[in-house]
Amino acid sequence: MRAAAHHSRTAYGTPPEGPRAPCATAPLHEHRTAQPAPLVLSARSGNRDRVHAACPEALALGIRPGMSLTRARALVEPLTVIPATPADDARRLEALGLRLLETFSPHIGVDPPDGLLLETTGVDHLFGGETALMEALERYLRDLGLTPRLALADTPAAARALARHGARTCTIAPAGTTRTHLAPLPLEALRLPETIRDGLLTLGFERIGDLLKRPRAPLARRFGPVISLRLDQALGDVDEPFRPLRARETPQARMAFAEPVGTGESIAAAANLLARSLCHTLQNRGLGGRVFDLFCHRVDHRVVSLRIRTSTALHDPARLARLFRERIDTLDPGFGIETMILRATATLPLAPARQTTTDDGDEGSPASVRDLSPLVDILVNRLGGQRVYTLRSVESDVPERSVVRIPVLSRSDRDPPPGSGAGTGTAPPWPRPVRLLTPPESIDALALLPDRPPRAFTWRGTRYRVVCADGPERIFGEWWKRPAEQDAVRDYFRLETDTGERYWVYRLGDGENPDTGSGRWFLQGFFA
């Protein structure tokens, strides 16, 4: 697991037109005039007013968050003090997390009062690596007017500690180096209670590295288990789950059990009830789901999930329950599941219902189209989305580029069938084979140059004698896509062998000018 943490605790003396930091947005909107004196935000803690956040000028003069307001006024005079609004800050922090949810990570949690945790496992490659991900995140936050401190580490606790107490504003701890990066940090980075932290300081412990060098048992006898727990969480020996944010408009259904469940039958029955509740919500909103996630919270605080994708917007509880039922056995319930959540992660507005064909329906009617989406959904979730596809024609003369794979049922009814040439400006001047080899396979051919078809050819060790041929059909390279195809030429021939098979072969080049191709022969397709 790789986790990133964002931390910002800065108030600004001269506020901009928009929010600058989560801890300062609400009060700064009410004070638009320029502030000649350093600015701090105050909050009540016990029976004292303390500094909640401070602008850079105040920080440079020695004021620190947590300092009593009386001491801050004694250090800096004059000092502008504005009451903090933690509730507004929390709402804006959650809103910021939801914005990041759409761009940087599907799992983002709030780390009060002013931090965010991002699960980045499997995400960094989309940005070109961890460094590029952190640069993009920092740039995004600075564009919003924030001054972030970022860290990337193996665990949420380590990322949080490095972001809040590290020496750099952006720290990336490579995998497996958590202990090394945590060692120089102060004890505050472990989130220990103040009494325990003061006791450790009295005994001479100042850094996390001091604790890592000592045996745990004496510390546990004196201070309890909290020190070992925090160290284990930071090092990854104990999981520290966080509650991820989700968009408020995301439809979901939740079920908690009085006793943990672990059998496939009970999980399937619960998924069926959740499907009914969720589909009822979708129908009321006029929506259909394309991606459904089932989250199972186990008693050991781990979460296992199952994702179902559908080819069309779905709100039928019976179909949804069947799709989950076929994959329930892939879930690991551990010692039992105590909570299940079914969420429609991706939704679309419902289209008007289509008529389907019955056994006595008019097959010639335009409306008599069989609904293949139930079959497609089953195949996709059994075999995987990459293995179930259809083809679509695109504008290209090069055969292997003339069709592309697309998800089943995503092609419009008005799209031309693949290989027809419709929609590309002109129809193919020559018949096309029913099957293409990708990539084309090299063959040894015997032919008279420059434009005669082969008399015989050898493919995969077998020699074929040609009795009938048609061609050539010349196709030029697409120089606007690849400079190497500036002069490229292919001459295609349809060949029929003495055993009745029909093949589609081509010669690379025109047979005279070596700049047009090497003159080698390739087999690319088969005719019916």
Image (cartoon, helix red, strand yellow):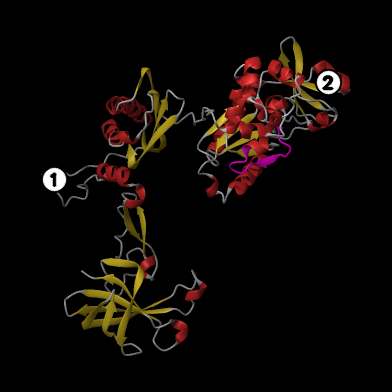
Q: Residue at x 55, y 39 (%)?
A: 2
Q: Residue at x 35, y 28 (%)?
A: 278
Task: Give the main secondary structure of the magenta stretch.
Answer: loop
Residue 340 occupies quadrant: top left
Instruction: Say which element carries label 2.
Output: helix
Identify the mark at residue 361; answer none if there is no mark.
1
Q: Find the magenta span and give its range.
A: 165-178
The furthest residue to the left = 360
The image position of residue 127, as x and y in percent, is: 56, 49
Judge the density around disc 2: few (<14), some (14-19), many (≥20) Cα neighbours within 10 Å.
many
The image position of residue 298, as x and y in percent, is: 42, 25
Q: In the figure, 512 relative to 185: above or below? A: below
First along the sequence among labels 1 and 2: 2
As shown in the figure, which amino acid type bears the numbered disc 1? Gly
Number of the front mark, 1 or 2: 2
Distance from the alpha carbon under mark 1 to that under mark 2: 84 Å
The image position of residue 456, as x and y in percent, is: 25, 83
Q: Quadrant of the C terminus?
A: bottom left
- Relative to 47, is 464 on the left or the right? left
Instruction: Say which element carries label 1.
Output: loop
Residue 47 appears in view: yes
Residue 432 appears in view: no
As shown in the figure, which amino acid type bears the numbered disc 2? Ala
Decide whether residue 173 is among the magenta residues: yes
- Relative to 459, is 295 on the left or the right? right
Whether the residues at callouts 1 and 2 have beta carbons within 8 Å, the answer is no
Identify the mark at residue 72; answer none if there is no mark.
2
Residue 86 occupies quadrant: top right
